[in-house]
Image (tube, grey):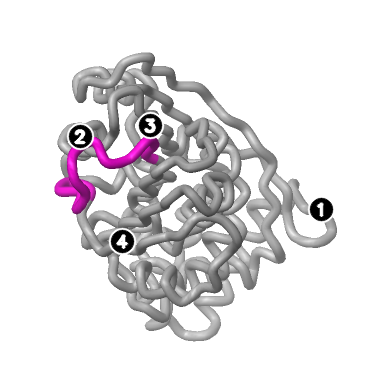
Amino acid sequence: MKATEQWSVTREAAALYERVVARHILGPWAPSLVDAGGLAEGDRVLDLACGTGVVARIAAQRVGPHGRVTGIDLNPGMISVARSLPALDGGGIEWLEGSALAIPLPDASVDAVLCQQGLQFFPDKALALREMRRVLVRGGRLALSVWSSAGLYNTAVGQALARFVGEDTAARFRASRNAPAKEELERLAIAAGFSAVSVRIARMRIHLPRLDRFALEHLAATPVAASIAALDHESRNSIGASVMCDMQRFNDGDGVTYPEETHVLTARV
């Protein structure tokens, strides 16, 4: 969330993003994306559009002390939070502020590129994929994910924003789900020079805590935070209540558990 001005957030919002979004929305998917990258001990790995580093930290554990992980994000707030988090056992992680359109790494310098829910934010997706290929060694691997649909929870939040804030704010929030479809992903990867391109649907049941509170915390970690903060108390509460009502059929007694899916693209150089 990371490569366009739309998803530029403050350092404080990035810290909330780590606690809310990275933990509950993106975190459950991170191990499977690392699996898709086929990481081995000693690998050099790039986590592109790394956010606060949920994928990078798992990758570092997989590659071990002889491996190396580089996390790159355009947003300085995200990188600042990533650097502040405790190190885990495994390979070292270098955190860099940089663009997916000009990755600040040499040619053929990594064995695997991972990118979780970042491609949809890149203003030039074709160039970003060429840059991913450039930094990979021959035989290197790419694994990236993008949402395959608006999703149940995000749809509920978007509807609440349209109702209580305005359509412009709702559209800004919904942008995170405006991802290329399967055929477009395949076309982009092949045009960038990748081989063995495959796109599959991954499915998971996601648990979120009580939504009247969670939805507002989530929104405070996004670029629409200022629009939400400007609302009166009753309007903010109405957003949370609306989301909780829309998702009530997935109530599990401790929040909601609902089905979610994403596209996962894998490819080789």
Q: Secondary structure at mark 2?
A: helix
Q: Mark 4 touching mark 2, by CB under 8 A?
A: no
Label 1 secondary element: loop
The quarter holding residue 24 reads: bottom right
How far is mark 4 from mark 1, CA to CA? 31 Å
Q: Quadrant of the N terminus?
A: bottom left
Residue underneath mark 1: 252
Whole-Å distance between the Cαs marked 2 and 1?
Answer: 46 Å
Q: Report crowding for label 4: few under 14, some 14 to 19, many 20 or more residues within 10 A (C-alpha).
A: many
| Residue 247, position as x, y percentages in the image | 67, 51
**Residue type indicated by callout 2:** Arg
Q: Tell me which amino acid carries mark 4.
A: Trp
Figure check: 137 above or below 71? above
- Magenta stretch bounds: 100-113
Residue 43 x/y as whole percent: 44, 40
Identify the residue at horizontal 54%, vertical 40% (top origin): 41
103 falls in the magenta region? yes
Sequence-wise first label, 3 or 1: 3
